[in-house]
Amino acid sequence: MRSKTAIEIYAYWDELRGHREVPARSQIEPGQIRNILADLFILEKTPRGDIRFRLAGTRICALFARELRGSTFDALWLAEQTGRLARIANDVMTQKTPVVLSSVSLAGVADRLPTEIILLPLRSPDGNVDRIIGALVPLSRPHWLEATPVNYLELDGMRVLDIEKTDLFLHNAPGTAPSATRQQTAHQPMGDHSIAGAIRRVLHLRVLEGGRRD
């Protein structure tokens, strides 16, 4: 992982996970990751089997100059890569395995921006692993970024995270932000409505009403 945001959300996800394969969606406490909420998103698998944005951070929406809630994850990618990205996101959930994607954001006529994306599986209230929390972060901030929206992403590489090795790296890495303790998360579950309310209060994720309710 190259971005501080990816490292921080992974550390938080891993702390929530504890000794289980995947943490529950209800464990997420937005206030504990408020400094990176603008770069985060949540995907969900719909009853039809497609994978769509349930929430998207304001910096991600600004990067593409449009709201992403309700749109499919694979629609962000080059046409010839959409099938592959849908399979990757589906595999993150079915295999319960975190993945880091190296990509290039394509903007304007020839602007290219290295971008990192992390996908972390989540368990929904019904017990199924059909959600993903992730981050999408440009690895530099060129002068044109605020004025020229990204049109598509181009996949450049994929790495399945070895959880044991990644944990060792995080424990030895300086400056990693502390995450919630397991005792706190065990006694402070939050459903989607509570999380959406907290997100509105910190004003980092833009939430539109509608969609599936749990």
Image: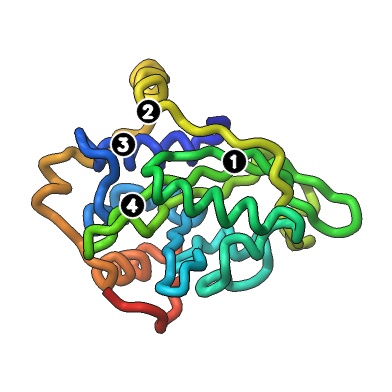
Q: Residues within 10 Å of mark 1 (few under 14, many from 20)?
A: many
Q: Badges 4 and 2: C-beta atoms under 8 Å apart?
A: no
Residue at the image point whose x is 47% and y is 58% from the top: 41
Question: Identity of the amino acid at label 1?
Answer: Leu
SS at circle 4: strand
Residue 77, quarter of the rendered image: bottom right
- Residue closer to the observer: 192 or 85: 85
Question: Identity of the amino acid at label 4?
Answer: Leu
Q: In this rendering, which labeled residue sits more in front, label 3 or label 2?
A: 2
Question: Identity of the amino acid at label 2?
Answer: Ile
User: Mark 4 to mark 2: distance in Å?
Assistant: 15 Å
Q: Badges 1 and 4: C-beta atoms under 8 Å apart?
A: no
State the residue position of label 3: 14
- Residue closer to the observer: 165 or 140: 165
Give the percent coordinates (x, y) of residue 39: 51, 52
User: Mark 1 to mark 2: distance in Å?
Assistant: 16 Å
State the residue position of label 2: 163
State the residue position of label 1: 101
SS at circle 2: helix
Between discs 3 and 2, the one toward the N terminus: 3
User: Mark 1 to mark 3: distance in Å?
Assistant: 18 Å
Where residue 122 is drawn, which disc sits there? 4
- The residue furthest bottom is 210
Question: Identity of the amino acid at label 3?
Answer: Asp
Residue 203, quarter of the rendered image: bottom left
SS at circle 1: strand
Give the percent coordinates (x, y) of residue 75: 65, 65
Q: Badges 1 and 2: C-beta atoms under 8 Å apart?
A: no
Between discs 1 and 2, the one toward the N terminus: 1
> From the viewer's perspective, is 99 left or right of 189?
right
Give the percent coordinates (x, y) of residue 7: 45, 34
Between discs 3 and 4, the one toward the N terminus: 3
